[in-house]
Image: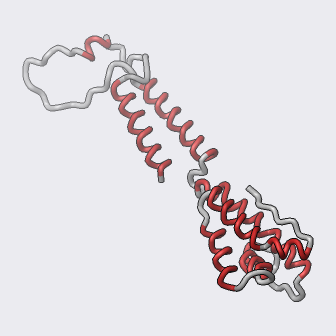
Amino acid sequence: MNVLIALLLAGGAGWYLWRTGALGTLPSSSVDPKLLMNPPKPPVPTAPTTQTSGFGGSGGLIGGLIAGAGFLTYAIVNLGLFRGGEEGVKTNPARDRFFQQFISWCAANVPGWSYGTGSSAQQPAAATVLSYVVDGNRANTLITNVYLARTLEDYTAAAKAMAAALQPWADRYGVRIEIPT
């Protein structure tokens, strides 16, 4: 949401700078810019018209559009705009890799494992390995905290708490729990 506000502000600033002529140096027409900035007073009042500034015609508009496109590209690529922001670009992939280690262990070591190895097996795998060391309520809390994390920082804290609770299980079965980021 903050990125959208920034885009709106940048677009508004770009439009203002284009409209006032601050973005370009090319005259928008062959008319002397001084006349456009200080036009002679008409002898008879006329209906209001829209007048562009003498500086910044199409050159300013194109510059503003290029700047806007550059900012939008940056926001899409680096900030994850339209891809879920930090959660979609960083947190979810790290969370998937975190749960995948439990899915792999369950698929190899739990007789009759029927949940497969895809993302639908994340919760059952985490619950299965946690059932070795904590009760159901504590397991539910640990799993929920990992799922509810929206930022990489929150995810890391929740994953560390879950890994700490799973340490006796990891020691017993010789598993190294990794917290991907």
On-image quarter of the C terminus: bottom right
Residue 120 in the image: state x and y as whole percent: 73, 77
The residue sitting at 77% across, 83% down in the picture is 131
Q: Is residue 155 above or below residue 4?
A: below
User: In the shown orientation, is residue 72 left or right of residue 94?
Assistant: left
Residue sitting nearer the eye, 42 or 173: 173
In this picture the colour scheme is secondary structure
Q: Is residue 77 above or below residue 168?
A: above
- The quarter of the picture where residue 148 lies is bottom right
User: In the shown orientation, is residue 135 left or right of residue 47?
Assistant: right
Taking the view exactly as shown, the residue that stands out farthest to the left is 44
Q: Is residue 93 above or below residue 138?
A: above
Figure label count:
0
Q: Is residue 17 above or below residue 130?
A: above
Taking the view exactly as shown, the residue that stands out farthest to the bottom is 112
Residue 84 in the image: state x and y as whole percent: 59, 58
Residue sitting nearer the eye, 165 or 48: 165
User: In the shown orientation, is residue 16 left or right of residue 148?
Assistant: left
Residue 47 in the image: state x and y as whole percent: 14, 31
- The quarter of the picture where residue 70 lies is top right
The residue sitting at 81% across, 73% down in the picture is 102
Residue 116 in the image: state x and y as whole percent: 82, 79
The residue sitting at 36% across, 14% down in the picture is 30
The residue sitting at 74% across, 75% down in the picture is 122
